[in-house]
Amino acid sequence: MIQVEGLTKDYGLRRAIDDLTFNVNKGEIVGFLGPNGAGKTTTMRVLCGYMPPTAGKASVAGFDIIEQSLEARRKIGYLPETVPLYPDMTVFDYLKFMADLRHLPEAEDRVDDVLEMVHMEDRSGGYIGNLSKGMRQRVGLAQALIHEPEVLILDEPTIGLDPVQIHEVRNLIREIGKEKTVLLSTHILSEAQQVCNRVLIINKGKIVVEDTPEELQARLAGGRRIAVRVAGDPQGLDQLIANIPGVSRVLGVLTNGIDFETDPGNDVRPEVARKLVASGYDLLELKPLGLSLEDIFLELTKEQNEEIEEREEDELEESEVGELEQDEKDEQKEG
Ligand code: ATP
């Protein structure tokens, strides 16, 4: 549904996104994750046709975002980070206005439909200015849905909401995601874990990793901290596990199992399972512990940040050497 190839956007000398390539398949909810300034909004704006890319290409529902911009935009519902709403309009009038702008036939029926979708039928006569932030976000979602787009692009849809509203909006996205393809940006990693089928992590304009939230966690946590739970008395379990090659230490003994740590890059779980069962323990659970998506994110971006820093230092050194050489030449000339 969304195909992006080599997408690059420069703001003057600043490269905001750098050679991005990714796809979002029909029916997926994909989370676009990254810290502030990573390039999420820029990517979304380019996809929505708000501004052209510097290089690369992208298509939405088969339509090229530059060559067939109008068709592509008809397929996209966009919820910007700050939704431009008119506080003096009622919810109904605003949505009707948005429907008329898109020349939708039977606009009033469409407004009723989207109000139902975002569970705001009873607020249609209220003024937007009197709504809570969560309700306004729903109005924003309603306007993004008004023309029945196939693809929804949501820029930080839960930012600034209280926990109850966050919960409601996430539920709503999951519900809508059953019928639409959704690309949503967030820097809250647990949000991606709860809502998305797949995660793209972006840092400094580049995609660092692409995976399902579960696989990401398993991939990185597989060789770290592991929890073993057994039925019955776990006596002797710590000794047994401590002697398995690749286990670095036992972290704690509980009433129903133990937690232990492994050497990095060493997934000892199959061996632990075999040994436990062979020794007569009733194994209930064997799962990676502790690495949240936050940890994973830091881990993945650390390497990239170090590379970028090294490159910048090298460039600085080279330019300093260049300046020195130039100074020497100038001095020789003067001499
Ligand atoms: P946030 O989570 O803060 O919204 P983001 O991941 O959406 O961040 P972008 O807003 O796309 O990131 O910004 C990417 C980079 O481009 C940043 O370094 C930002 O300062 C820069 N940038 C964004 N918009 C402009 C602009 N209009 N002119 C110049 N630079 C810009």
Image (cartoon, rainbow, N blue to C red):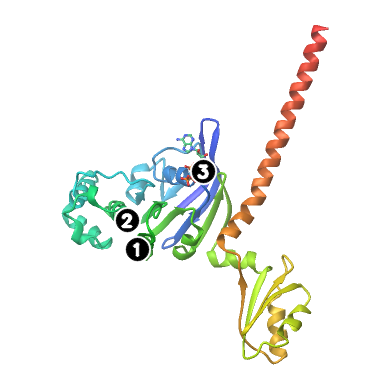
Image quarter where the N terminus lies is bottom left
Q: Nearer the viewer, residue 21 or 113?
A: 113
Disc 1 residue crowd, few under 14, some 14–19, many 20+, Cα 10 Å:
some
Left or right of 193? Residue 226 is: right
Whole-angstrom CA distance, mark 1 to mark 3, is: 27 Å
Mark 1 or mark 3: name the one nearer the start of the chain: 3
- Report x, y in % for residue 54: 50, 36
Disc 3 residue crowd, few under 14, some 14–19, many 20+, Cα 10 Å:
some
Left or right of 241? Residue 66 is: left
Q: Which residue is mark 2?
A: 134
Name the residue type under label 3.
Gly
Label 3 beta carbon within 8 A of ligand 1: yes
Mark 3 or mark 2: name the one nearer the start of the chain: 3
Whole-angstrom CA distance, mark 3 to mark 2, is: 24 Å
Label 1 beta carbon within 8 A of ligand 1: no
Name the residue type under label 2.
Gly
- Report x, y in % for residue 151: 37, 55
Is residue 61 visible in the rendered structure shown here? no
Q: Residue at x 25, y 52 (%)?
A: 131
Q: Which residue is mark 3?
A: 37
- Report x, y in % for residue 52: 44, 37
Q: Secondary structure at mark 2?
A: helix
CB-based contact (under 8 Å), mark 1 and mark 2: yes
Q: Secondary structure at mark 3?
A: loop
Name the residue type under label 1.
Glu
Q: Secondary structure at mark 1?
A: helix
Q: Nearer the viewer, residue 103 or 178?
A: 178
Q: Which residue is mark 1?
A: 168
